Image (cartoon, helix red, strand yellow):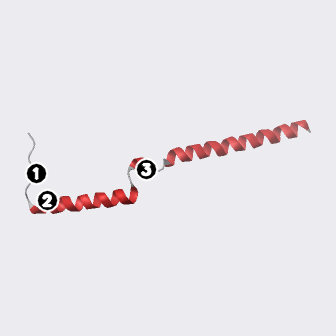
Amino acid sequence: MTTPPSQDPEDDRRRARRKELDRQVRDRYGTWRDQPRGLACAVIAAFLVLTTAAFVFAVIAVVAAVR
């Protein structure tokens, strides 16, 4: 069995402060689903940069080989 919540007035004040803090945090930061996926963005950006660099290097190598 679980213990029922305390009827202590201090607990009510603590709960109210906690609810207010939770509301402020949600208003400021949203939920985790609203946040950008930083690591995924970094991985995709790195892939794009490296792919572009490899493509440029391949073009330079082909041009140099033709000469």
What amino acid type should be assigned to the residue bearing mark 2?
Answer: Asp
Crowding around mark 2 (Cα neighbors within 10 Å: few <14, some 14 to 19, many 20+) is few
Crowding around mark 3 (Cα neighbors within 10 Å: few <14, some 14 to 19, many 20+) is few
Q: Nearer the viewer, residue 55 or 19?
A: 19
Label 1, secondary structure: give it.
loop
Residue 31 falls left or right of residue 54: left
Coordinates of residue 31 in the picture (x, y in percent): 38, 51
Q: Which residue, given by chain and number where applicable, does mark 3 sit on?
A: 34
Q: Which mark is residue 11?
A: 2
Q: Which mark is residue 5?
A: 1
Residue 50 falls left or right of residue 42: right
Question: Which quarter of the image is occupied by the N terminus?
Answer: top left
Coordinates of residue 37 in the picture (x, y in percent): 48, 47
Q: Quadrant of residue 15?
A: bottom left
Label 2, secondary structure: give it.
helix
What amino acid type should be assigned to the residue bearing mark 1?
Answer: Pro
Dots 2 and 1: beta carbons under 8 Å?
yes
Crowding around mark 1 (Cα neighbors within 10 Å: few <14, some 14 to 19, many 20+) is few
